Image (cartoon, rainbow, N blue to C red):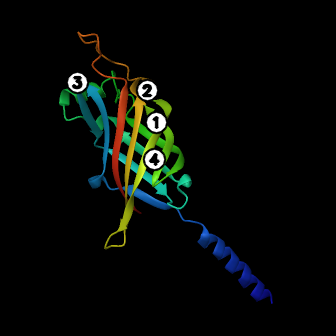
């Protein structure tokens, strides 16, 4: 009778654990991922990215509100395909990479919006200044490859005001405008693989 009772308890405990959706840990596949920012420069749109970064997240499609994401980029790895501009971006006029070597993002909340879209709330830190930001995420789906590894795709977009993070340098143009607008767009195309 005691053995039977213990078996019933064990079965109940196992049933509870099995019913809880397990978080899946993922790492970014850098060969299929780009971390970009865009802003206007004079009359054109300039795109830049970071060559050196780490990113990880936990994702549960059944309970996405419990998911989390973390991203850390080496500020000195900024690359806009223009050496002179990159030198300026690394200077104390912008990222000041000698004093602030990392740019980071840590999620604080994931809100499902329906149709595989989510609002990702978090804190972005640039030049030692931490501010809340909102990002829009679209989950593009998943596949399992021949090695039984799960791959997931995401598109992430957002906008930040660079002056909120101490990136205040600018230049007044002859027509009265400015060389660089305050708003910077974030554009991330990400593929992740399950650990």
User: Where residue 124 is drawn, which disc sits there?
Assistant: 1
> For the residues carrying marks 1 and 3, which lies nearer the camera in this image?
3
Which residue is at a point 35% across and 34% down the rendered structure image?
Answer: 185
N-term-proximal mark, 2 vs 4:
4
User: Where residue 43 is drawn, which disc sits there?
Assistant: 3
For label 2, count other residues whose C-alpha is less than 10 Å away and answer few (under 14), some (14-19) or many (20+): some
For the residues labelled 2 and 3, the Cα–Cα distance comes to 24 Å
Mark 2 highlights which residue? 165
For the residues labelled 1 and 4, the Cα–Cα distance comes to 10 Å
For label 3, count other residues whose C-alpha is less than 10 Å away and answer few (under 14), some (14-19) or many (20+): few
Q: Left or right: where does residue 32 sit relative to residue 71?
A: left
For the residues labelled 1 and 3, the Cα–Cα distance comes to 28 Å
**Disc 1, disc 2: CB below 8 Å?**
yes
Where in the figure is residue 140, as x and y percent of width and height? 38, 56
Mark 4 highlights which residue? 70
Which residue is at a point 38% across and 28% down the rendered structure image?
Answer: 99
């Amino acid at each position: 009778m005691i053995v039977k009772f213990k078996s019933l308890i064990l079965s109940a405990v196992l049933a509870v654990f099995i019913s809880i959706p397990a978080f899946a840990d993922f790492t970014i596949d850098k060969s299929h991922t780009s971390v970009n920012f865009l802003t206007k420069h004079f009359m054109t749109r300039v795109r830049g990215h970071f060559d050196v970064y780490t990113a990880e997240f936990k994702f549960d499609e059944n309970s996405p509100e419990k998911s989390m994401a973390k991203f850390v980029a080496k500020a000195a790895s900024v690359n806009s395909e223009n050496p002179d501009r990159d030198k300026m971006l690394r200077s104390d006029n912008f990222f000041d990479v000698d004093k602030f070597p990392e740019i980071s993002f840590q999620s604080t909340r994931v809100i499902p919006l329906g149709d595989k879209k989510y609002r990702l709330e978090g804190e972005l830190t640039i030049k030692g200044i931490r501010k809340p930001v909102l990002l829009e995420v679209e989950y593009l789906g998943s596949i399992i490859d021949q090695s039984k590894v799960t791959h997931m795709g995401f598109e992430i977009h957002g906008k930040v005001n660079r002056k909120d993070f101490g990136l205040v340098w600018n230049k007044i143009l002859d027509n009265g405008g400015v060389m660089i607008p305050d708003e910077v767009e974030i554009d991330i195309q990400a593929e992740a693989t399950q650990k």
